[in-house]
Image (cartoon, rainbow, N blue to C red):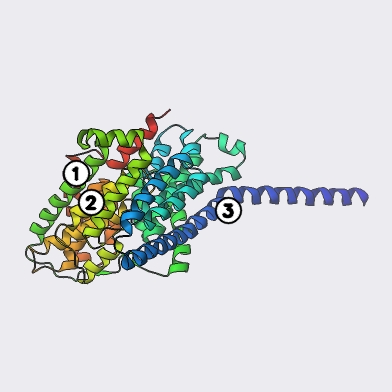
């Protein structure tokens, strides 16, 4: 009896040990990952609310004293550049080039470009920038934040688990976090998948598909639970009929958007070829002062346009869609000037929302020629065209915009506009994010 009792105890001990091992494997394969995806969705929503709150404060003080941005924006430019360079190096710009560099570069780039310190800096400094009226979006930073957060979860895995295929798990975590970040930012799950394939990886791996979709589902559920089933710019109702001059409008908007988007990429990538010598020297030797100068340019353009070029452009795009906007035909160019001024100093900030606003302005301007066509239809074409021109990722641009639209009749026209604009843009400059990522790959 005593021997049987000992055997039973050992058997239960073995079962408990196996149960614990199985639970640990499930935690490593699913639990950590699910926890990270939920966290990405939560942070994306809170970050969006923080940026909206910051821009609301800006609008409040700018409405009371129209001249105040002329003082606040230069101070903000100087402070954000100093903080970025002094404490949060690696958090500059949209963050997408950093993610691309980590996914395609050596393993040591991840611990340098995707850290919790950079995550905090990205959120905090972009909040300061929007307080100053800078033309930035939150979508690119959300992608960077999502990738950094998921990448940091590698610490939950034992070294033997990471050593099986060095760098593979870390890249999958970062890729899933980036896709979940975009999905939660736009409430566009399809865009998250397509962006990961077209822009970040430039390829498709069957093993990665489940990881991406799971992350997007969990992040999306959190976003929907907090914000509800919203559409980023509201539903654009196109209807089922197509106007007579649609093909000509597609061609015209595609070319215009491609020209403007290509010029924007060229300006960012070729500063030494167009920027005056004294300004180049100022940017290189005294970047904080250059940040203040850039803030002044942003403020002057914003004041001259009665505040329409400040911020991401979300409000202007919505008002154009609703037909209540009072923007000039020059709005796309002026908004682009403010966008270049916001990006050159190096403070954190994204390009997606300002690009959609500029695209809205293009559609609004073209409506002066095609007045017989629906304004929302032209704005949708302008959005997809300019976003495709800046990112040179036409499928991602098309999917982001199509998830905002109620009217499948326009699908082919949106695809054609995105393709034309991206091809025209390629005549001016290579893909922007890839070119910027090369700078991180070249750094020691």
Which residue bears the numbered disc 1?
263
The residue mark sitting in front, 3 or 2, is: 2
Mark toward the viewer: 2 or 1: 2
Where is residue 188 drawn, in percent x and y? 36, 60
Q: Is residue 149 above or below residue 166?
A: below
Q: Identify the image quadrant of the C terminus.
A: top left
SS class, disc 2: helix
Figure label count? 3
Residue behind mark 3: 31
**Secondary element at tag 1:** helix
The residue lying furthest to the right in this view is 2
Give the residue displayed 23% in from the left and 63% down from the top: 306
Q: Position of residue 134 (x, y in %)?
A: 33, 54
Earlier in the chain: of badge 1 and badge 3, it is 3
Residue mark closest to the camera, 1 vs 3: 1
The local crowd at label 1, few if under 14, some if 14 to 19, many if 20 or more residues have their Cα within 10 Å, is some
Q: Is residue 90 in view? A: no
How far apart are the alpha carbons under marks 3 and 2? 44 Å
Q: Left of 147 or right of it: where is 314?
A: left
Marks 2 and 1 in Cβ contact (< 8 Å): yes
Residue identifier under label 2? 336
Q: Quick check: 246 above or below 26? A: below
- Image coordinates of residue 182 in percent, x first then y, are 39, 54
Q: Earlier in the sequence, mark 2 or mark 1?
A: 1
The Cα atoms of the two marked residues, 2 and 1, are separated by 10 Å
C-alpha distance separating marks 1 and 3: 46 Å
Q: Using the image, determine if residue 417 lies above or below residue 93.
A: below
Residue at image location 10% in from the left, 59% down from the top: 249
The first of marks 3 and 2 along the sequence is 3
Residue 337, given in percent of the width and then of the height, sits at 23, 50
């Amino acid at each position: 009896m005593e021997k049987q009792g000992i055997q039973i105890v050992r058997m239960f001990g073995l079962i408990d040990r196996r149960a614990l091992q199985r639970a640990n494997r499930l935690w490593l394969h699913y639990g950590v990952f699910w926890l990270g995806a939920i966290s990405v969705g939560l942070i994306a929503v809170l970050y969006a609310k923080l940026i909206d709150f910051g821009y609301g404060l800006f609008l409040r003080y700018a409405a009371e004293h129209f001249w105040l941005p002329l003082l606040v924006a230069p101070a903000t430019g100087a402070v954000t550049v100093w903080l970025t360079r002094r404490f949060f190096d690696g958090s500059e710009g949209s963050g997408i080039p950093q993610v691309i560099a980590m996914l395609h570069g050596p393993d040591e780039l991840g611990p340098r470009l995707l850290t919790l310190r950079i995550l905090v800096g990205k959120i905090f400094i972009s909040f300061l920038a929007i307080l100053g009226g800078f033309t930035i979006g939150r979508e690119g930073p959300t992608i960077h934040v999502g990738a950094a957060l998921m990448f940091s979860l590698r610490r939950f895995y034992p070294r033997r688990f990471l050593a099986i295929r060095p760098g593979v798990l870390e890249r999958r975590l970062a890729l899933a976090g980036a896709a979940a970040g975009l999905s939660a930012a736009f409430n566009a799950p399809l865009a998250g998948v397509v962006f990961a394939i077209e822009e970040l990886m430039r390829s498709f791996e069957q093993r990665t598909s489940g990881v991406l979709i799971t992350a997007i589902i969990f992040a999306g559920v959190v976003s929907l639970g907090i914000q509800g089933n919203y559409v980023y710019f509201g539903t654009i109702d196109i209807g089922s009929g197509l106007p007579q001059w649609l093909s000509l409008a597609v061609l015209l908007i595609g070319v215009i958007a491609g020209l403007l988007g290509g010029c924007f990429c060229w300006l960012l990538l070729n500063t030494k070829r167009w920027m005056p010598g004294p300004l180049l020297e100022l940017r290189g030797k005294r970047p904080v002062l250059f940040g203040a100068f850039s803030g002044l340019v942003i403020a002057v353009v914003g004041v001259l346009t009665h505040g329409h070029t400040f911020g991401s452009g979300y409000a202007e795009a919505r008002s154009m869609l609703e037909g209540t906007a009072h923007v000039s035909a020059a709005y796309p160019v002026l908004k682009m000037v403010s966008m270049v001024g916001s990006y050159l100093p190096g403070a954190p900030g994204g390009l997606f929302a300002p690009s959609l606003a500029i695209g809205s302005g293009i559609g609004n301007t073209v409506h002066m020629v095609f007045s017989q066509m629906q304004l929302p239809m032209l704005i949708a074409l302008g959005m997809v065209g300019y976003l495709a021109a800046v990112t040179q990722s036409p499928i991602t641009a098309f999917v982001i915009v199509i998830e905002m639209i109620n009217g499948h009749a326009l699908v082919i026209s949106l695809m054609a506009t995105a393709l034309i604009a991206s091809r025209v843009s390629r005549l001016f400059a290579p893909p922007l994010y890839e070119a910027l990522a090369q700078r991180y790959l070249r750094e020691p």
